[in-house]
Image (tube, rainbow, N blue to C red):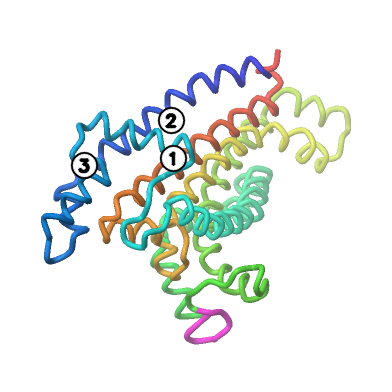
Amino acid sequence: MLGFLARRLGTVVPTLVLVSMLIFGLQQLLPGDPAKILAGEDQDPTVIAYLHKKLHLDEPLPVRYAFWIGGVLRGDLGESVRNQQPVLDLVLQKLPVTVELAVLAMTIALLVGIPAGVAAAVGRGTAWDLGANAFALWGLSTPNFWLGILMILLFSVRLGWLPASGYVSPFEDLGANLAAMIMPAFVLGNALAAVLMRHTRSAMLQVLSADYIRTARSKGLREAPVVLRHALRNALVPVVTLGALEFGTLLSGAVLTEQVFTIPGFGKLIVDAVFNRDYAVVQGVVLVTATAYIGLNLLADLAYFALNPRLRG
């Protein structure tokens, strides 16, 4: 286990360094002088010169990267030039919102996708299989923003059951928090449930045709223990890996859903930063999401190692 972890960390560290270089380098390719943009309409030369010095814009690119990555290693992601707040503070404010949304969406996806995949594999060719595949096709082909708008029209405008937008902290009012988050969580979880269903069905079909499953059935074991105890445990190995990676995608890819439901999470933070040319915030948010995705990838590898005994041999 330790050897496997050391090998994976040996690839994670260079990957993080490369990602940080790409984030910083691509940011520099954006057109325009950030100092002139931040100086406002007057563009006072004194203010521009001050901003150049403060942001190290008058230094060569490698020196600017060294200043930035040095701050990152100290926990300093820079300062938002729009609201004069540390980027790390903004990240810590917005990250719990997106994490909650991702956790709720993943919970919905797991509760729907895995049982549907198991039912489709066990009842291959039956109405259960056809229904599960139709659900997966619908989930994969439905745009998140379109589904979100339809849900707002139905549950908020027509029925008045749920708020159309906004966010309430669970520490203030848990009921209001869940009411505000259930629709965006379902929108994100719907597509993910379809992906998990397809992978669970495929993995279960492969496992159910294995020799040890036929041996378990020949011993007289009931179908439920064979499916749940023997087949599902082995079929979940690739599904767990996929789930960890998809959770990272949820953290970084909920931009449209957060915009539709006006949720003040990572998605809205980075969109506002891009429109405001707040480069420090853009770099900080992208770096955090990329690091989270790489970390979840590492956890997925460790889960795969723990669930697959052949890797421990």
Q: Which residues are magenta?
A: 155-163
Badge 1 marks a residue whose secondary structure is: helix
Residue lying farthest to the front in this orientation: 46
Mark linked to residue 16:
2
Residue 249 included in the magenta stretch of the image: no
- Residue type pointed to by label 2: Leu
Crowding at mark 2 (Cα within 10 Å: few <14, some 14-19, many 20+): some
Q: Position of residue 73 (x, y in %)?
A: 46, 34
| As drawn, 140 above or below 227 | below
Q: Position of residue 257 (x, y in %)?
A: 43, 63
User: How far separated are the C-alphas under marks 3 and 1?
Assistant: 25 Å
Mark linked to residue 290:
1
User: How far separated are the C-alphas under marks 2 and 1?
Assistant: 8 Å
Say which residue label 3 marks: 57
**Foreground disc of the pair 3, 1:** 3
- Residue type pointed to by label 3: Leu
- Residue type pointed to by label 1: Ala
Front in this rendered view, residue 247 or 55: 55
The answer to whether 153 appears left or right of 247 in the picture is left
Which residue is painted at 81% across and 31% down in the image?
217
**Foreground disc of the pair 3, 2:** 3
Front in this rendered view, residue 134 or 101: 101
- Number of numbered discs: 3
Instruction: Give whichever of discs 3 and 2 has the lower sequence position.
Output: 2
Q: Position of residue 6 (x, y in %)?
A: 59, 18
